[in-house]
Image (tube, rainbow, N blue to C red):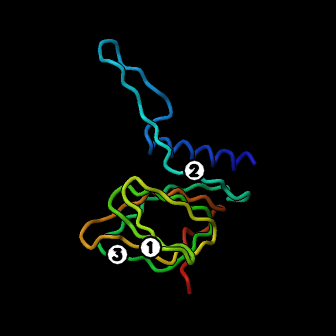
Amino acid sequence: MLKVIGVCGLMISSLFVIAGCAATHSAAPGEGMKSTTVTKILTQALPEKVGTEARVLLVEYPPGVTSPAHRHPGVIFAYVLEGAVECGLDDGPVVRYEKGQAWYEHPGQLHRVAKNASQTQPAKLLVFFLTEPGKPVLEREK
């Protein structure tokens, strides 16, 4: 239980780094009032057993690249750093996610569409992956 709490704490701390900073900072005297802005990007309840290992991954899609259909054995939180991607989960609609947007995938969910939405611009994702130690990041559909 302590490992899971530590992993979730690490992930939450990392999300604060993406969004800004968790604390408000006052400016030095004479600089006027300045503060850090924190923006909630995504909130998702987690399944009871999400594993005890956290990985932070950078996924880069060159222009026009599509990934084959796959599943992840753990929980995925994806955040678009650059460009735009199209994502289709299970039988749901294909959704376009642009810079600053995020989504969640539950363990074993079919990621049937995963591609760069542009034929000319790259796309980058920051992915937080929670799983059992040693599990692969993805399993391709057969």
User: Which picture quadrant has residue 142?
Assistant: bottom right
Q: Residue at x 50, y 55 (%)?
A: 56
Where 116 falls versus 43 (above or below)? below
User: Could you tell me which secondary element the residue under label 3 belongs to?
Assistant: loop
User: Could you tell me which secondary element the residue under label 1 belongs to?
Assistant: strand
Q: Residue furthest left?
A: 120
Q: Three-letter amino acid code at disc 3?
A: Val
Q: Which residue is mark 2?
A: 43
User: Could you tell me which secondary element the residue under label 2 belongs to?
Assistant: loop
Q: Residue at x 30, y 12 (%)?
A: 30
Q: Residue furthest right?
A: 1
Mark nearer the N terminus (3 vs 1): 3
* Few, some or many residues within 10 Å of mark 2 (<14, 14–19, 20+): few
Q: Nearer the viewer, mark 2 or mark 3?
A: 2
Q: Residue furthest top?
A: 29
* Few, some or many residues within 10 Å of mark 1 (<14, 14–19, 20+): many
Q: Which residue is mark 1?
A: 114
Where 57 falls versus 16 (above or below)? below
Q: Which residue is mark 3?
A: 65
